[in-house]
Image: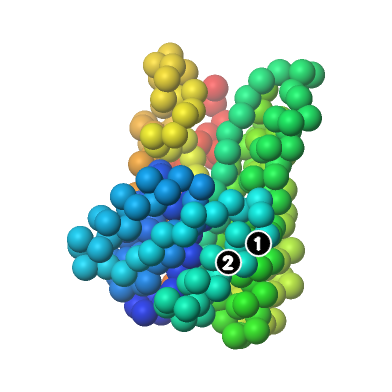
């Protein structure tokens, strides 16, 4: 499938140095999209940008923190100077934590909510404001299976990801009048290099795979193509929706 409306566009990806964000940046660049990557980890960003440029793509990296409005405003300004108005925003930045709900500290709670939820809100607000003024834009936020179901000892993460789904609905119905589509992706259990229980605990990993009807963990590229679909012209009539890409995990009722 080809994806109309992407060649020559300017896409900003938060959390673009690792995992799904990294794979998405490379795929968007391969179809002619100019890519601006934002993250707190300059080494990861530089590596992705170098790979994209080696393959003939156009990309730049900006070190910044999604929790800081000034960083997002600076990133948008630099992206516009280099590539023109930001047409596409994908919010991949996020942090994960787990522990007993009765003992989670205020600092841990605030760290997760500030990055996952407030960071998504700030980035949507700053970039979305630019899109509203230009009369066009595509935004994809990242939720989680925990947007819908409860896993023990993940209260902060689940709260942040559930809120992202509802934030996406509100922004979707509010901003489509300005030509800005806002939707969300919910990845299933994806094998990535970032710290996660499924990567370090073989027994946990086996239980998860047993629970996934497709019989394996997802790969970053399994999430990339649906995301590219949502930011392409194929998805112009999709508004405020959350697309679950999980190998059938949520649909499966058998334990």
Cα distance in 3D space between marks 2 and 1: 6 Å
Closer to us: 16 or 207: 16
Task: Measuring from the top left, give residue 115's x and y in whole percent.
Answer: 64, 45
> What is the quadrant of the N terminus in the image?
bottom left
Task: Measuring from the top left, give residue 47's x and y in whole percent.
Answer: 31, 50
Q: Residue at x 68, y 37 (%)?
A: 111
Give the labeled residue for mark 2: 74
Q: Secondary structure at mark 2?
A: helix
**Residue 98 falls left or right of residue 10:** right
Give the labeled residue for mark 1: 70
Q: Residue at x 58, y 34 (%)?
A: 96
Closer to us: 233 or 157: 157
Determine if residue 230 is in view.
no
Q: Residue at x 51, y 47 (%)?
A: 40
Spot the residue most to the top: 203
Contact flag, marks 2 and 1 (Cβ < 8 Å): yes
> What is the quadrant of the C terminus in the image?
top right
């Amino acid at each position: 499938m080809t994806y109309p409306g992407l060649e020559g566009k300017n896409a900003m990806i938060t959390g673009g140095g690792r995992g799904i964000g990294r794979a998405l940046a490379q795929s968007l660049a391969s179809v002619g999209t100019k890519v601006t990557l934002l993250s707190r980890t300059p080494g990861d960003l530089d590596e992705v940008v170098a790979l994209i440029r080696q393959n003939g793509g156009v990309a730049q990296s900006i070190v910044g923190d999604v929790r800081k409005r000034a960083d997002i405003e600076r990133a948008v300004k630099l992206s516009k100077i280099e590539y023109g108005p930001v047409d596409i925003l994908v919010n991949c930045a996020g942090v994960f934590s787990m522990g007993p709900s009765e003992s989670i500290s205020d600092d841990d709670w605030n760290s997760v909510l500030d990055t996952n939820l407030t960071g998504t809100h700030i980035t949507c607000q700053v970039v979305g404001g630019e899109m509203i003024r230009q009369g066009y834009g595509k935004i994809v936020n990242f939720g989680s299976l925990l947007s819908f179901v409860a896993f023990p000892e993940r209260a902060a993460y689940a709260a942040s990801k559930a809120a992202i789904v509802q934030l996406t609905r509100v922004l979707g119905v509010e901003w489509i009048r300005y030509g800005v589509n806002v939707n969300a992706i919910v990845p299933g259990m994806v094998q990535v290099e970032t710290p996660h229980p499924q990567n370090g605990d073989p027994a946990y990993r086996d239980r998860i795979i047993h629970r996934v009807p497709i019989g394996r963990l997802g790969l970053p590229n399994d999430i990339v193509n649906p995301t590219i679909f949502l930011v392409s012209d194929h998805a112009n009539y999709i508004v405020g929706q959350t697309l679950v890409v999980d190998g059938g995990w949520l649909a499966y009722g058998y334990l």
